[in-house]
Image (cartoon, rainbow, N blue to C red):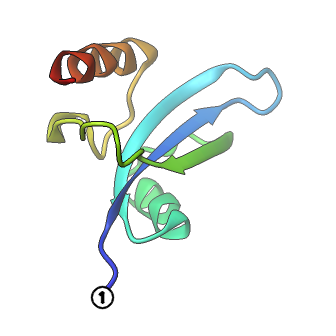
């Protein structure tokens, strides 16, 4: 049985390249991660770049998952993760 992975989804405006947000979604695969983001209404549109969460990095707290994160929130999460390393 496949286990859910944590996926990093980063969104930008395809015309301007401006940042629209990041979300961290638990899903079996990429396609499901995108569908979950739509269902949770945390996909702001635009172009998405995504990758599985690196296995060597500590996992972020639940408070960062399944919501659309701003640049400031991403930076805060990164600082929190650095303190765990």
Q: Is 83 positioned to the left or the right of 43 in the image? A: left
Question: Vertical placement of 62 versus 3: above or below?
Answer: above
Q: Is 81 positioned to the left or the right of 49 in the image? A: left
Q: Residue at x 30, y 74 (%)?
A: 3
Question: Vertical placement of 78 versus 1: above or below?
Answer: above
Q: Residue at x 28, y 13 (%)?
A: 79
Q: Residue at x 40, y 71 (%)?
A: 28
Coordinates of residue 59 in the picture (x, y in percent)? 24, 41
Badge 1 crowding class, 10 Å Cα cut-off, few under 14, some 14 to 19, many 20 or more, is few
Which is nearer the eye, 69 or 41?
69
Coordinates of residue 75 in the picture (x, y in percent)? 37, 14
Q: Which residue is mark 1?
A: 1
Question: Vertical placement of 13 versus 35: above or below?
Answer: above
Q: Quadrant of the C terminus?
A: top left
User: Could you tell me how many numbered marks the image carries?
Assistant: 1
Coordinates of residue 57 in the picture (x, y in percent)? 32, 37
Coordinates of residue 41 in the picture (x, y in percent)? 41, 49
Q: Residue at x 34, y 42 (%)?
A: 56
Q: Quadrant of the N terminus?
A: bottom left
Question: Vertical placement of 79 versus 21: above or below?
Answer: above
- Secondary structure of residue under mark 1: loop
Of all residues shown, which one is farthest toward the bottom?
A: 1
């Amino acid at each position: 049985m496949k286990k859910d992975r944590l996926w990093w989804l980063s969104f930008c405006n395809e015309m301007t390249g401006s940042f629209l947000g990041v979300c961290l979604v638990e899903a079996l695969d990429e396609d499901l991660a995108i569908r979950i983001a739509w269902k949770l209404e945390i996909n702001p549109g635009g172009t998405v770049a995504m990758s599985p969460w690196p296995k060597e990095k500590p996992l972020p707290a639940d408070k960062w998952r399944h919501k659309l994160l701003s640049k400031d929130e991403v930076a805060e999460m990164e600082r929190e993760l650095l303190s765990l390393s």
